[in-house]
Amino acid sequence: MLAYRHAFHAGNHADVLKHLVLVQILRHMNRKDKPYWVIDTHAGAGGYALHEAAAQKNAEYAEGIARLWSRPDAPASVADYLSLIKEFNSSGALLYYPGSPAIAQRLMRPQDKLRLFELHPSDHRVLDATFGAQPGVQVRCADGFVALKSLLPPPDRRAVVLLDPTYELKTDYAALRNAVSDALTRFAVGTYAVWYPVLQRRESHLLPQQLRRIAGQADWLDVRMQVREPDASGFGLLGSGMFLINPPWTLHVTLRELLPWLTGALGQFQGAHFALEQQAS
């Protein structure tokens, strides 16, 4: 049940899309002085050494961050993301990939708060050792979907909630939908960022439409990118998406500008493509 370790997938194409979006959201949040919280329901270990055995096993970063690392033609928003990742690699070589907690902490201000949840005992130990004593950060070994209920609404009524489960179990899909629905009931104006996989699986195909129904009349943005061609096995991560509820109003334009370049950079077959849809008031 707790077999998944993100270290095997660190820096892959899904991480690139997820963290590009996260950086843009937090840049937007920082435009106002008022404090905010970042809540990461499935935080993982917080950061990953790409030269160690776990990351080297499948070397998924080679088809993700490594493809962008030395590109001189990156759009401004991608260059911003890359400059942030390079801050964690001071030697200039790509040796380390920060997880969402590390990226969030680097961008947040002293007045902002970071709440991190991770159930895997080994990953939680690493996460707590890295972030547990940091000012404004709380780390808990808990189910983030359940714990989210106790945090909403936050005191200053500004928050970014990142929901990034493993989707290893079919029950993850229902748990995610229930968590988002409950969160919107408690805190309708929060920004919710849901990462989801693009798979040859019915649950994966249905999830974006289900999230649109849950969002109701709220603004939403759905971005997804497929970089791999389906094969006969029916397995494997073909791409990924981010479903945003109450996204920054600037995000649609930013993604529209960068997605053609990003899909070309990360695409592993001629049919690589992206989709970008929104509901905006």
Image: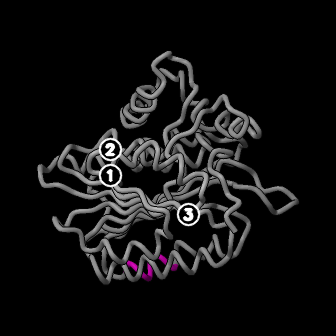
Q: Position of residue 61 (x, y in %)?
A: 64, 37
Local secondary structure at mark 2: loop
Local secondary structure at mark 3: loop
Q: Residue at x 59, y 56 (%)?
A: 240
- Residue contact at pointers 3 and 1, CB within 8 angstroms: no
- Residue contact at pointers 1 and 2, CB within 8 angstroms: yes
Q: Which mark is residue 274?
A: none
Residue type at mark 3? Leu
Q: Quadrant of the C terminus?
A: bottom left
Q: Where does the magenta region start and end?
A: 210-215
Q: Position of residue 60 (x, y in %)?
A: 69, 40
Residue 35 within the segment the image draws in magenta: no
Q: Nearer the viewer, residue 143 or 176?
A: 143
Taken as a whole, is the magenta stretch helix, strand or loop? helix
Residue 157: image quadrant is bottom left
Q: State the residue position of label 3.
A: 119
